Image (tube, rainbow, N blue to C red):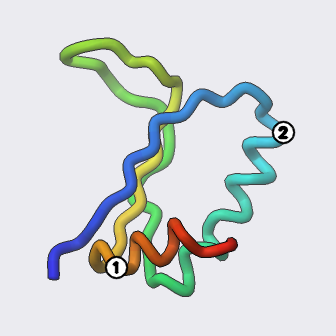
Amino acid sequence: MAAAYVIGRITIKDPQKWAAYRDRVPATLDPWQAELVFRGKPFAVFSGAADHTDVVVIRFADAAALRGWFESPA
């Protein structure tokens, strides 16, 4: 099975709320054996527009694990 990825493009409006949310995410990934690949600001935009200030990439073993994580209450 091929790995599956979540690519989140986000704009942080409240740094304190973002920090609290961000700190809880790893615990939601553990049951799905997912890995946070990247979280930060884009280096460059080569085409189109950057509508958001930050990017996050999470790798899952497969689409079923990704869906399970996304649909989980956590």
Residue at image point 46% right, 36% down: 9
Cα gap from disc 2 to disc 1, whole angstroms: 32 Å
Examine the rendered structure and indicate whether residue 43 appears above or below residue 27: above
Mark 1 residue crowding within 10 angstroms, few (<14) / some (14–19) / many (20+): some
The answer to whether residue 66 is left or right of residue 3 is right
Residue at image point 60% right, 75% down: 72
Residue at image point 16% right, 75% down: 2
Say which residue label 2 marks: 16
Q: Residue furthest left?
A: 1
Mark 2 vs 1, N-terminal side: 2
Q: Quadrant of residue 66?
A: bottom left
Examine the rendered structure and indicate whether residue 49 appears above or below residue 53: above
The front one of 42 and 72 is: 72
Which quadrant: the C terminus?
Answer: bottom right
Examine the rendered structure and indicate whether residue 70 appears above or below residue 29: above
Mark 2 residue crowding within 10 angstroms, few (<14) / some (14–19) / many (20+): few
Q: Amino acid at mark 1?
A: Ala
Q: Amino acid at mark 2?
A: Gln
The answer to whether residue 23 is left or right of residue 6 is right
Residue at image point 51% right, 73% down: 69
Q: Residue furthest right?
A: 16
Which quadrant: the N terminus?
Answer: bottom left
Query: Picture coordinates of residue 19 (x, y %)?
Result: 76, 47
Q: Quadrant of residue 12?
A: top right
Examine the rendered structure and indicate whether residue 54 appears above or below residue 31: above
Say which residue label 1 marks: 64
The front one of 62 and 12 is: 62
Query: Picture coordinates of residue 37 (x, y %)?
Result: 39, 59
Judged by depth in the image, the label closer to the viewer, 2 or 1, is: 1
SS at mark 2? helix
Q: Residue furthest front?
A: 71
Instruction: Give residue 18's mark.
Output: none
